[in-house]
Amino acid sequence: MYNNQQGGTYRRVGNPLPDSAVKSEDGLLGRAGPLKSDKAAMFKSNAPWKVVAFFFMGLSFLLAMRLSYTLGQESGYIKTGALGQESGYIKTGVPVVPGATGSNPAVEPPIQLTPATIPNPLDELRKFAIKPAQVDVEQIKSLPAARRIIVSKNLRIMYCPIPKAANSNWKLLIRKYEGFEDYADLSIANDRAASGFTFLEDLSAAEISGMLNDPDVLKFTFARDPYARTLSCYLNKFGNKDKSGEEYRIYMAQLYGWAWVKEHDIENEERPSFQQFVNQISTQDFGEMNEHWAPQTYLCGVGLFPYDFVGKLEDIATHAPKVIKWMANGRESHFPTQEEIKFSSMGANEQMNQFYNEEIKKKVHETFSEDFSRLQYTA
């Protein structure tokens, strides 16, 4: 390797000198071997083989040039570099002919791509960033979000799953690209101990700081309209659950308390109405709420954790493919539907008018005021 004046490096190529190399009188390295006349004789004796060798070398060069042209047709960017090391982006596309000019892009003069001229594929997503003025790693470690945020050094992401906002879809994708053979099993993906995920709280302060400061680590989450999310939660946990099942009993206890559940025959009593559900959760502290109806900003520390991208479920068809391309390094961009992951939808968006009136809307807005303001949802 040789350093140039600008701090770059050149790699020496070609056959290394053998151990028999000697130094000539002028100080230059040469090879120990026969004299010029002997070399000429040797060349003549090996001439047929040398012609064949030069022929195949020329053919190999032409094939390599053709292959290079073919592979360069699809334009895009490939991220390079290991996590924690200097990385960048290699632009792929139609090759250019050095020194040529003209209107044909295939023969335009070459443009040298530098870190300053190559766009970061994440720049478009970062238009939807929500970050604090200052980042306090110790404060972040103390947030409830520290237990939630999934960290993947391989995929270069930090993702906070929000229940009732397609978080099962994202967990499936992360496990898929991490190489888990059972990635499609959502019962495992949603089991904290069995999922195989690494969480923010598992990292040291230095590791967290390193990932937060790495421009090639995407910190993201997807939120949902608080009105639709609240109704979806009610339908899923109270409207459609088997009242004789243990799961319904647990959710009722998380809503009213275990003492209340023990005093009531919940299997034979009426289910709580949507208005009763909304009124009850409005009396709870955020810390005691079930994660399915707790405020999204509270769960993920929005405003305290430096998110590069806070997407909305309502726009997931637009933004999810860009995130997936980043995680899959350009190999895929499809966001799986509820049918594809075998996770039925509650159809909350289609039932809004049936369940909401002005009084309930006002109560939901009061309870989730931070979600409406920080996530930029209208009342």
Image (cartoon, rainbow, N blue to C red):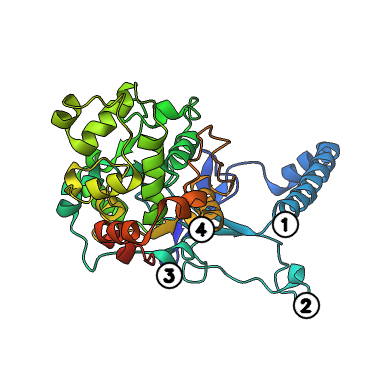
Find disc 3 in the rendering and name its residue.
Answer: 5
Q: Which mark is residue 315?
A: 4
Q: CA distance from mark 3 to mark 2?
A: 35 Å
Q: As drawn, is 128 to the left or to the right of 269?
A: right
The percent position of residue 108, horizontal first and vertical second, equals: 72, 73
Identify the amino acid type marked 1. Answer: Gln
**Distance of mark 4 from mark 1, alpha carbons?**
31 Å
Mark 1 to mark 3 CA distance (whole Å): 34 Å
Q: Nearer the viewer, mark 4 or mark 2?
A: 4
**For the residue marked with disc 4, what is the amino acid?**
Asp
Q: Left of 247 or right of it: where is 201?
A: left
**Residue 164 visible within the image:** no
**Element type at mark 2:** loop
- Answer with mark 1 or mark 3, whichever residue precedes in sequence: 3
- Above or below residue 117? Residue 263 is above
Q: Which mark is residue 103?
A: 2
User: Does residue 299 appear in the picture of this structure?
Assistant: yes
In this figure, which residue is indicated by the disc labeled 1?
A: 73
Tell which circle, 3 or 2, labels the residue nearer the N-terminal end: 3
* Residue at screen point 37% across, 32% down: 190
Q: In this view of the protein, which residue sits in the foreground, 287 or 355?
A: 355
- Which residue of the protein is positioned furthest toward the front in this rendering? 269
Decide: few, some or many residues near mark 2? Use Cα within 10 Å; few <14, some 14-19, many ≥20: few
